Amino acid sequence: IKKIGVLTSGGDAPGMNAAVRAVVRTALSKGVDVYGVWDGYLGLHQNRIEQLARHDVSDLINRGGTFLGSARFPEFKEESVRREAIENMRQHGMEALVVIGGDGSYMGAKRLTEMGFPCIGLPGTIDNDVAGTDFTIGFHTALNTVLDAIDRLRDTCSSHHRIAIVEIMGRYCGDLTIMASIGSGAEFTIVPEKGFDEESLIQTVADDVTAGKKHSIIAITEHVTDVSALAKRIEARTGLETRATILGHIQRGGVPCAFDRVLASQMGSYAVELLSQGVGGRCVGIQSNKLVHHDIVDAIENMPRPFKQDLYDLTSLLA
Ligand code: ADP
């Protein structure tokens, strides 16, 4: 293999830059040229593709976001659009593509692979919701950011005898909420995998207040319920001032933590190793502390992520 491409797609995540850097530098060390694609599948379709040199990825390992840019581009679900994208890549002489993104981006990579253009997927998202890996690039940085936010809320909650509801990202995956909850000592943990019984939550919070508890933190994943409305209902029942804080995109930005930089570097390098061995159509993961690769189609279709019941149980045991 002589020429490969790399793009970042979907929601940005800290560590994506480190992954691109690793792809570029590993490839160049093997005499393989690398083409960077701007703004994900959108730029791929618009043929915004440029060769990357070693120094193009200098001073990036410590930067959040993605210097290549990212985009949502639903049109990529159309086969004709993907065919034009493949044509653009072939014009540049590219033979394979490394896609760094979440499960939506993996779907695009899977489809390109099925159309005869081999892709390797790297899991880049703070949500930790990608098949075939224990951890995604960006997850640990976001976890630290969420922890920091909850620590701050705890200070003010305990000073003012308030209840705080913290809405945490993760789409339909509770990993970020569960681990942030354990790390911050939140009193209540609500995740999409477990459903949500509002009446029982409010009753327990009210019972705690009656028993003398002066403050509480409720960690909840996005999309589960309207947290501002929930705050009003808890306040009405308990008489304690209750505030909802939606952390939002704060969680997506920032300097990548050590773990994400190392993980991204390992995964980016591994992707190029695989391609140089003629292996395509795979997605890279880390499982039980070992780099692994799976068939990207099989991973998307047949590898559900097991719910972390043991960690979830710990949230209530220690609360
Ligand atoms: P993430 O990769 O973070 O999950 P999205 O779900 O938005 O983010 O997916 C990123 C991009 O991947 C989409 O904007 C689209 O271009 C592409 N994509 C998503 N689903 C598909 C699909 N079924 N077929 C082809 N491309 C897809």
Image: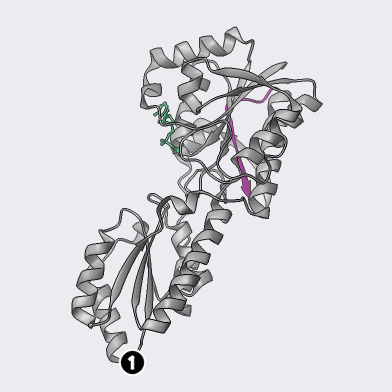
Q: Residue at x 48, y 79 (%)?
A: 318
Q: Is mark 1 within 8 Å of ligand 1?
A: no
Residue closest to the eye, 11 or 288: 11
- Quadrant hosting residue 168: bottom left
> Quick check: can you spot residue 188?
yes
Q: Position of residue 57 (x, y in %)?
A: 70, 33
> Quick check: can you spot residue 179?
no
What is the secondary structure assignment of the residue under circle 1?
A: loop
Region rendered in magenta: 277-288
Picture quarter with ligand 1: top left
Q: Residue at x 45, y 23 (%)?
A: 42
**Up/down of 91 relative to 245, above or below:** above
Quadrant in which the N terminus is drawn: top right
Residue on which the image places disc 1: 212
Q: Position of residue 275 (x, y in %)?
A: 68, 25
Residue closest to the eye, 31 or 66: 66
